[in-house]
Image: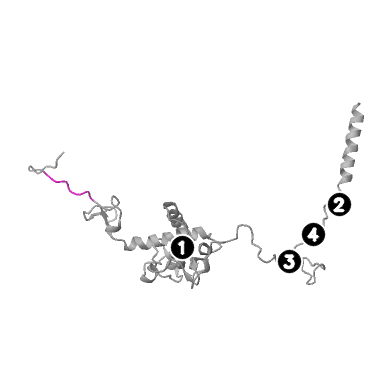
Amino acid sequence: MSSRNKFGSLGLLALLALAGCRQDMHDQPKFKPLAMSDFYSDLRSAREPVEGTVARGQLHEDTYFYTGMVGQNPGDYMPFPITEDVLKRGQQRFNIYCSPCHSRLGDGNGVIVQRGYRKPPSYHTERLRKAPLGYFFDVMTHGFGAMPDYASQIPPRDRWAIVAYIRALQLSQGATTAEIPQGQQFPSTPPVFRGDPGSGATQPVLMAPEQPKNEQGEQPK
């Protein structure tokens, strides 16, 4: 077959292919968003979902996980185990979203408060130390007083991680030495305050316990 015949055959195939692409394949019958439709008596093209329809990923069967409530009252347990990773995540999210008002210590003296914003209560008050865990989750979800809700910014699992970290903050302020695991306690020797020549301030410095000496007044080697 000559080159002229080859190009002629290809051109014919191209014309046939173009002829098969009809405009009505582009203009398919459909409802355009918010357009009027005389198909329905109310003339609305947008219809309500079928009753009982649940969007993908929004079944929310675990009511407590998404609300923090048991019936009409806040629950007082975590919906999943607290691990080191959960606390680290809670600390990170707390420092981002909560500390500007509540401060990183949870005492309510954050940087925004120092600039005139309404001061929130300290987490270390007796009332909030006794508050159930679900209470903190509910406040983050719906807001309270001057505090807006954070449901759109913080996913439910991160809200629970923050709740766990808040409880850890509270425990850290009221914990006794007996509650600290062995091997993680500070030495019993009281801190020695040493001056800083550069600033004139004093700072606590933990010194190692003094070693026993022998009869000659020398420390054993």
Residue 209 located within the stretch drawn in magenta:
yes
Residue 150 seen in this snapshot = no
Q: Quick check: marks 4 and 3 in contact, CB under 8 Å?
A: no
Q: Is residue 19 left or right of residue 76?
A: right
Number of residues whose C-alpha sits closer than 10 Å to that of mark 2, classed few (under 14), some (14–19) or many (20 or more):
few
Look at mark 3 in the image and give the residue it sits on: 47
Residue at left offset 28%, top offset 60%: 176
**Percent x, y for residue 76?**
43, 65
Q: How is the image coloured?
A: one colour
Q: Where are the magenta residues, as a range? A: 207-213
Q: Nearer the viewer, mark 2 or mark 4?
A: 4
Residue carrying label 1? 98
Give the alpha-carbon distance from disc 4 to disc 3, as whole Å.
13 Å
Q: Earlier in the sequence, mark 2 or mark 3?
A: 2
Q: Residue at x 89, y 45 (%)?
A: 19
Circle 2 sits on which residue? 23
Query: Disc 2 or disc 3, which is closer to the eye?
Result: 3
The answer for how far apart the CA atoms under marks 2 and 4 are is 15 Å
Q: Is residue 1 left or right of residue 179?
A: right
Checking the image for residue 75, the label placed there is: none
Q: Position of residue 132 (x, y in %)?
A: 42, 67
